[in-house]
Amino acid sequence: MVQIKTPEQIAKMREAGLVVAAIHAATREAAVPGATTRDLDMVARKVIADAGAKSNFLGYGGFPATICTSVNEVVVHGIPDDKTVLKDGDVISIDAGAIVDGWHGDAAYTAFVGTGHAPELIELSRVTEESMWAGIAAMKLGNRLVDISKAIEGYIRRQPRPATGKYGIIEDYGGHGIGSEMHMDPHLLNYVSRKRGKGIKLVPGVCLAIEPMVSLGTPQTEVLADDWTVITTDGTWSSHWEHSIALTEAGPIVLTSPDCGKAKLAEYGVTTAPDPLG
């Protein structure tokens, strides 16, 4: 069953989303050469504590940290520690979440550590982020879940191929419903699968976390011995972007974006609903 949210519940999710946005801003500033991924986790913990919110990552399935810190070939679910020291030229994807009064927010971004990044890495992050926005723009009343998948995959496939030969749309992980839990139905693929059909109809109150993950090579992944860290099987680097979105009668609200996604969605001809917090 897909959970349909009331306007009041969406407003609480917006509060949680703004805490996630604050985590992103603080960790982006802290992701510099010499910082450890544990340092970034401590930054996130402080933001959550200062906001009076709770972490939805810490303890989830036994996860031992507040954020996921995925560096270079790590696609998702990297565990912060004292051994992973960020270096000039690294790429890191930071996935963060928060709970306010039982309602969840979840979002991720990719950042460049220091300088000197290869053009294909910069383009990889751009393509991944823009495919996310293409998917968000397809979250329209009357569309189906597959329309989001189609928009994400279509955007990626239309881009010029990188020097490595192709973009790998990660197959084992995707987006999801979000609300009173962090991960809920429906599961959202970042590509079209005939086996999955068209998926649910998008109606007011549907809330989704849309999160493409793309590598510079294979779409295949493996999980390391810690049972969390996911890497590409060919060692190519990857990018991960995510926002949580609520669909309302007046249009979408990007709950984890400071401006509700207004500026970016305008580029797609989409008008966002008013911020439920005013």
Image (tube, rainbow, N blue to C red):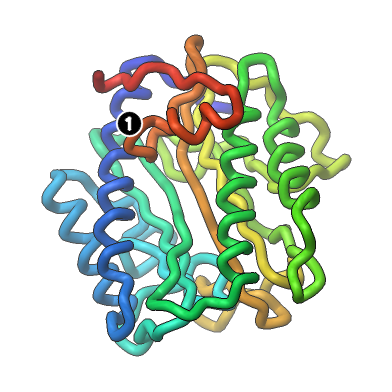
- Quadrant (top left, top right, bottom left, bottom right) of the N terminus: top right
Q: Position of residue 38 (x, y in %)?
A: 28, 76
Q: Which residue is mark 1?
A: 14
Q: Residue at x 36, y 50 (%)?
A: 97
- Residue 220 placement (x, y as % from top left): 74, 69
Q: Is residue 150 above or below residue 235?
A: above
Which quadrant of the figure has residue 268? top right
Check disc 1 and give the amino acid type.
Arg
Quarter of image, res 99: top left
Q: Residue at x 71, y 79 (%)?
A: 233
Secondary structure of the residue carrying numbered label 1: helix
Rendered view: 46 above or below 179? below
Would you call the spot at circle 1 few (<14 residues within 10 Å), some (14-19), or many (20 or more)? many
Residue 187 versus residue 216 in the image, above or below: above
The residue drawn where x is 38% and y is 39% is: 256
* Count of marks placed on residues: 1
Residue 269: percent from the left, percent from the top?
59, 23
Quadrant in which the C terminus appears: top left
Residue at the spot 30% in from the left edge and 81% down from the top edge:
36
Which of the pair 64/218 is nearer the observer?
A: 218
The residue lying furthest to the top in this view is 249
